[in-house]
Amino acid sequence: MKFEFYHGLPAQARKIREDVFVKEQGFLEEFDSDDTRAVHILAFDGSQAIATCRFFRQENYYLIGRIAVLKDYRGKGVGREMLEYAEKRIVQLGGKEIRIHAQQSAEEFYKKLDFISMNVYDYEQDCRHVWMRKSLF
């Protein structure tokens, strides 16, 4: 698996997010102004884009979000590898902390990757989310 990063939302990332968040999960408001300021990461299996995420600086931390893996590649470590790649990029930029706004159903996945719940729960488009953080030092 290889990773590439982009400034600006690449078409392959848009397609993956549409497939996962809009078609599979029913989110209607998937794209926002943060897409223009974020660094976007694509994971590739050969030449096929299979996963994406984005990150950007927010106050004194980096926010990683829109983590999406195509259905056929879930459960194979793709999400974990992509987050590890994002963490390395953030460390290179001087980042000391990452936060995510995760769907509550994915909370255990992030805990296995050393994210800690901030015990702040809210809803995004009728889906319960939790704020989580991870120190990078």
Image (tube, rainbow, N blue to C red):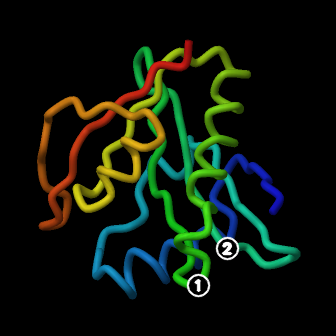
Answer above or below: position of 113 versus 3: above
SS of the residue under disc 1: helix
Q: Position of residue 39 (x, y in %)?
A: 64, 43
Answer above or below: position of 60 versus 64: above
Rendering quarter of residue 74: bottom right
Q: Position of residue 106 (x, y in %)?
A: 33, 58
Q: Mark 1 = which residue? A: 72
Which of labels 1 and 2 is toward the front?
1
In front of the other: 35 or 137: 137
Which labelled disc corresponds to residue 50?
2
Q: CA distance from mark 1 to mark 2?
A: 9 Å
Answer above or below: position of 7 versus 50: above
Question: On the rendered structure, is 98 left or right of 83?
Answer: left
Q: Which part of the image, by quadrant, shows the C terminus?
A: top right
Whichever of callouts 1 and 2 sits on the residue coming sooner in the sequence is 2
Whether the residues at callouts 1 and 2 have beta carbons within 8 Å, the answer is yes
Rendering quarter of residue 63: top left
Few, some or many residues within 10 Å of mark 1 (<14, 14–19, 20+)? few
Residue shown at the point (32%, 51%) measured from the top left: 108
Q: Amino acid at mark 2?
A: Ile
Q: Position of residue 81 (x, y in %)?
A: 66, 51
Q: Position of residue 24 (x, y in %)?
A: 37, 85
Q: Amino acid at mark 1?
A: Asp
Count of marks overlaid on the render: 2
Residue shown at the point (29%, 76%) measured from the top left: 28
Which labelled disc corresponds to residue 25?
none
SS of the residue under disc 2: strand
Q: In the orientation shown, which residue stands out farthest toward the right? A: 46
Q: Which part of the image, by quadrant, shows the N terminus?
A: bottom right
Residue shown at the point (57%, 43%) measured from the top left: 38
